[in-house]
Amino acid sequence: MLADILQYDFLRYTFITGILIGIIAPLLGTFIVVRRLSLIADALSHVTLGGIAFGLMIEKLFAIAFNPLFSGLVFSVLGSILIEKLRSVYKAYQELAIPIIMSAGVGLSIIFISIANGFNTDLLNYLFGSVSAVSQNDFFMILGISIFVLLVVTLFYKELFTLSFDEEYASISGIHAKQIHLLFIVLTALVIGSSIQIVGVLLVSSLMTLPVAAAMRISKGFKQMMFLSILFGELSVIIGLISGYYLSIPPGGTIVMISIIILLLTIGIKKINLFKKVREA
């Protein structure tokens, strides 16, 4: 595959994009899992699908060149803002915001797909990922998003860390909890929207949670968990893209299965270490 990457631009864009996604998805996923908000990734991925279906519908009905990734990102960001609004409406039942937005995303997807006369190859690529879906413009958009995410996490790491473990203390200590959380969920929406071309709508949340779940089993602190999550995410993406390319199957499935294998290995390692400690005691 290395020779092909050097020869073909689309493979080079896909591979580099995969490396970027392997960093930012588990990075934000660490905060998402710690805050027990894993289902937000699923909700926003379904909203993003609605945006992508809308873009494909516009492209087909009006016969104009339109990038569905852009409309997917817009829908995802709007969905993240609506989740925050609904969380403030249902203060005692904030988790209701997630299934409401997820349902809206699925409903819009079905409507837009129906108007566009059903599925096509492009939509299937967005559902399951593709090694040839990343164009030069997409690559630069995702690169910009990645730089923005890394910059925000670096600048607001302390606030995000405090908010993740104790939201009440964060509010009392003077941290603008609502604004920081809104910024965080918008970042999550951008990462989900940008990850879809590699992993696919149906599997994108896995890349934000499975590497973190694996890292939690063997890490000894939050920063170590973050580092291991990114490491496992990169391994999953790189091995998944290469195996998907040679097996001629969508990379989303192979990336997720590699993540599952890594998770099972870390669970096994943890159990072996516990068994050794018990025997030594």
Image (spheres, grey):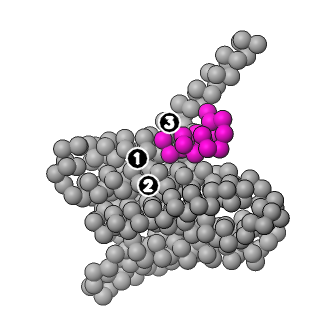
Q: CA distance from mark 3 to mark 1?
A: 12 Å
Q: Which residue is label 3 attached to?
A: 262
The image quadrant that residue 99 belongs to is bottom right
The answer to whether 277 appears left or right of 129 in the picture is right
Q: Does the magenta portion include 275?
A: no
- Residue 58, position as x, y percentages in the image: 36, 83
Q: Which residue is label 2 attached to?
A: 21
Which mark sits nearer the N-terminus, 3 or 1? 1
State which region is magenta.
215-231
Q: Amino acid at mark 3?
A: Ile
Which mark sits nearer the N-terminus, 2 or 3? 2
Q: Residue at x 26, y 85 (%)?
A: 63
Q: Which mark is residue 237?
A: 1
What element does badge 2 sit on?
A: helix
Residues packed near mark 2 inside 10 Å, few (<14), some (14 to 19) or many (20 plus): many
- Residue 85, position as x, y percentages in the image: 68, 77
Residues packed near mark 1 inside 10 Å, few (<14), some (14 to 19) or many (20 plus): many
Please report contact status of discs 1 and 2: CB closer than 8 Å, yes or no: yes
Q: Amino acid at mark 2?
A: Ile
Which mark sits nearer the N-terminus, 1 or 2? 2
Residue 13, compared with residue 81, is above or below; it is: above
Residues packed near mark 3 inside 10 Å, few (<14), some (14 to 19) or many (20 plus): many
Query: Can the viewer see residue 14?
Result: yes
Q: CA distance from mark 1 to mark 2?
A: 8 Å
